[in-house]
Image (cartoon, rainbow, N blue to C red):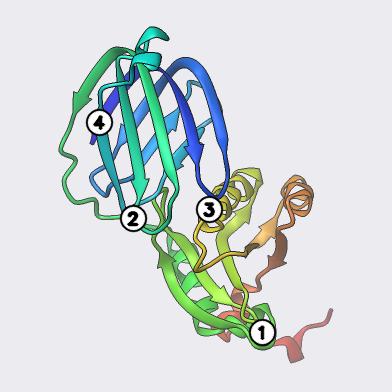
Amino acid sequence: MRLVIARCSVDYVGRLKAHLPLATRLLLVKADGSVLVHSDGGSYKPLNWMSPPATLRVSSPEDVDLELGVMEQWTVQSAKTDDRLIINIHEKLDESSHDLGVDPGLIKDGVEADLQRLLAEQIETLGTGYSLIRREYFTAIGPVDILARDAEGATVAIELKRRGDIDGVEQLTRYLELLNRDPLLAPVRGIFAAQQIKPQAKVLANDRGIACITLDYDAMRGVDDSESRLF
């Protein structure tokens, strides 16, 4: 992984256009080909990024950019689309590279892992006609717990938690922003599923067009005898 702290401006050009004016930022160049642009705020969400597969080309700026103080230009080209991330670097403040090796991946606690497995096996819990695409669908910012298709064939990303809070909704929001850049998947909608979901998380999810589903873990495991309940 390569880390560069630099004064830079950033432009995303392609299916959408976005501009980040000149400021000091952290640039992450990962071994998988992804490039992420971070600020010192906004938690762990990048300001902009390019997902793999992509190629990074470093070039000298044109005369007009040199006059504006640009010392180096990065062009990150997507291999699947015409999308480009153009980073104009005015000054490098620090730079380092590190070999992180092979990551073993996130190990979920027992209940979350079981919920994921059970929901994948019982995907029609979400609705009639649902089908599983895959568990742990890889993205540049982490794996989506479950990727599925609904009865109409639309793509659905599901984030699973034991207890659903605002952080989980934020996490799913980032996945949806990334997945909806892929023309083979878009449009992608989200479902936030948990054993318990906090009221604040439900409000935020509703505001972002994300559905919330409460899962009955015991019933999914087949140990819940609903006929013997008093209530």
Find disc 4 in the rendering and name its residue: 58
Q: Quadrant of the N terminus?
A: top left
Residue 39 or residue 105, whichever sits in front: 39
What is the C-alpha distance between the residues marked 1 and 4?
45 Å
Above or below 27: residue 55 = below
| Residue at mark 3 | 175
Residue 154 or residue 70, whichever sits in front? 70
Quarter of the rendering containing residue 227: bottom right
Of circles 3 and 4, the one toward us is: 4
- Residue 41: where, in percent of width, then height? 53, 23
What's the amino acid at mark 1?
Ala
Query: Mark 3 to mark 4: distance in Å?
Result: 28 Å
Which residue type does callout 3 highlight?
Tyr
Q: Which mark is residue 138?
A: none
Sequence-first disc among 3 and 4: 4
Query: What secondary structure is marked by label 4?
Result: strand
Q: Amino acid at mark 4?
A: Val
Q: Is residue 127 above or below residue 145?
A: below
Q: CA distance from mark 2 to mark 4?
A: 16 Å
Ranked by sequence position, the earlier of labels 2 and 3 is 2
Instruction: Find the distance from the CA under tag 3 to the CA under tag 1.
Output: 22 Å
Disc 1 crowd rating (10 Å Cα; few below 14, some 14-19, many 20+) is few
Q: Residue 151: give its label.
A: 1
The numbered dot on residue 79 is 2
**Front tag of 2 and 3:** 2
Q: Amino acid at mark 2?
A: Ala
| Mark 2 or mark 4, earlier in chain | 4
Q: Earlier in the sequence, mark 1 or mark 4?
A: 4
Cα–Cα gap, marks 2 and 1: 31 Å
